[in-house]
Every structure is written in C-alpha cells, then in structure tokens.
Image (cartoon, rainbow, N blue to C red):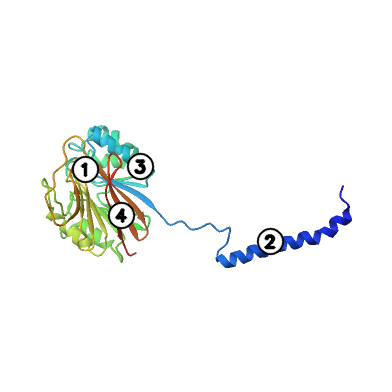
Amino acid sequence: MENPTRALRRRPRVVLAALAAVVAVVLLVVILGRSPTAPQAQEPRAVVWAVGDAADGSPGSIALAALITSAPSDRFLYLGDVYARGTASEFRDNYASVFGRLAPKTAPTPGNHEWPNHATGYDPYWTRVHGRRQPAYYSFSVAGWRIFSLNSEASHGAGSAQLRWVKDRLGRGNCRIAFWHRPRFSAGRVHGDQPDMDALWRALRGHATLVLSGHDHNSQRFKPRDGIVQLVAGAGRGGEPLYPLRRDARLAFGDARELAALRLTLTPGRARFAFVAADGSRLNVGEVPCRA
C-alpha cells in the first residue's frame, strides 16, 4: 500500500497537471472559435427523383424503378401518365407493381392518360396511399425549396382557381420548383410546345427556378428562359420506342434513345440535376442557384 504522506505530496502536482490540461483546451477553443463538444450544423440536403410516362409495367420501366430505389432518396415526383387509361386496375397492376415501393414518398401530378378516369383511378389510389384526400394541386417544402405540384389537365388558364391559388402562394425569391405533366416547351416531334400552359409559366416568372414535366417520351433540358430552366423527364416507358426530337436552338440537351429519370440534389440556394439512364450512366448534368 502506498504511503499516505507520499500521496498527499504528489496531489498538488496532479492538480496542477489537470489545470494545465484545462487551460490548454480553453486556449484551443478560443483559437478555433467553437466549442469542442458542440455538434456541427448539417446543411439540409435532399435527393429527389422525377420521371413521367413510366407506369406501363414493362421491363424497361421496372429497370428504371430499380435504379431509383437502388439508393436512399427523400422524394419521388411522378410526372403523370399511368397506362393506358389510368383505371383502378392499371394503378394496381402497372403503377403499384413497379413504383409501389416509392409510393409513401411520392408526390404525383396527373397526366392526360389518367385524368379522364381520375375519380376512379388516380384520386382513390393516392388518397389510400397518403391517408388523405388527394388534392388536384398542392405544394410542400424540401431542403430550403418550395415544390409545387400543378395540374396541366385541370383548368389552369386566366381566371382559373388553380392560377389564383398559385399566385397567392408566390412570395419573394425564386427557390421554387414546379412540376406538371404537359411541358410548356418541347422539341418533341410527337407533342411539341403546349401553349395552353403559358398562364402558369408566366405566373412563375421571377418566382421559380425549375419547371419539370413529362408527356414527351424523351429527355430534354432547355436553356434558361424567363429565369427558369425547364426539364422534360418523360423517357420512362419501356414498352415502345421513345419519341424523336427535332433540332431546336432552345435545347441545351436532348436524348431520345435512353430510358432515363431525373435526379435532383437540393440544398438551400442550389439545385443540382442529372438525367440518369436505366444503367446508371449520367446523360447530362447541370445546376441552378436560387435566392431565398
């Protein structure tokens, strides 16, 4: 057993050593300007996938769904069209069988194929999935961005309830993304521009940075117009050939050969995007800033 007298003599040295360690830590904190125990704030970040015209139950659409579910994501935007007419059985057999795993995190918008039957297909399916009545248009927030699901198949022109709803919810800044089925602009040879969407587009000028659509079965990225970049992500249907593109000076990128989906990585003030083919290769990438 150690002599108690010796232990008492050594105690001042132990105390001094401990004090010296504390002083060193305090000095380090002052130099670094932060607490060593305080957790560092993480910048909000979200991964959002988007694609339309993919729910036909084909092997190609299954491969695309496998790509989207291969890594964690926060949201899935389905840009419309469940084939062939969006009936209740087609939502069950063609949509749920392919994208059902993503249903709880899915924000949908209706396409021209399913909207005529929305009362028996689209509405009850999404009401059941989300546990509440599915609105025709709505918005939500993700990683510093406000995302608007709008409806190209419901009334959206001048004087419409939808247009008033949108305008009432557009404040300052442009950290907003809007998506609907039929694109305002398109270089597709099958459908092309949709002039009736102009009222919604004009309402978003100065208030949004990205607009996403499907409808044309291909991938398109337009050069900025009115401060907005439009992306068409309709290359999801594997049951038949994709729709061809015409030469169009408005395009920054176009592809009509690969089944692909759009991947967005959102952080406050910035959105990065990539068109990703079913095999995982990136066809085109870009980014846009926004002001809150």
The numbered mark, 4 or 3, whose residue comes first in the sequence reads 3
Kindly identify the amino acid type of the residue bearing the numbered disc 3: Pro
17 with respect to 141 (left or right): right
Kindly identify the amino acid type of the residue bearing the numbered disc 1: Ala
Residue carrying label 4: 147
The image shows residue 12 at horizontal and vertical percentages of 80, 62
Spatial CA distance of label 4 from label 3 is 17 Å
Q: Residue at x 27, y 33 (%)?
A: 92
Spatial CA distance of label 4 from label 1 is 22 Å
The image shows residue 89 at horizontal and vertical percentages of 23, 32
Spatial CA distance of label 2 from label 4 is 51 Å
- Which residue is nearer to you in this view: 181 or 275? 275
Q: Residue at x 72, y 60 (%)?
A: 18
Residue carrying label 3: 104
> Could you tell me which secondary element the residue under label 2 belongs to?
helix
The numbered mark, 3 or 1, whose residue comes first in the sequence reads 3
> In the rendering, which numbered label is found on residue 235?
1
> Could you tell me which secondary element the residue under label 3 belongs to?
helix
Q: How crowded is the residue under tag 1: few (<14 C-alpha within 10 Å), some, or many (20+)? A: many
Residue carrying label 2: 21
Q: How crowded is the residue under tag 3: few (<14 C-alpha within 10 Å), some, or many (20+)? A: few
Kindly identify the amino acid type of the residue bearing the numbered disc 4: Ile
Q: Residue at x 20, y 63 (%)?
A: 226
Compared to 157, does 262 lie above or below?
A: above
**Labelled pair 4, 3 in contact (Cβ < 8 Å):** no
Q: Select label 3 or label 2 by which is in front.
A: 2
> Could you tell me which secondary element the residue under label 4 belongs to?
strand
> Could you tell me which secondary element the residue under label 1 belongs to?
loop
Spatial CA distance of label 3 from label 2 is 52 Å
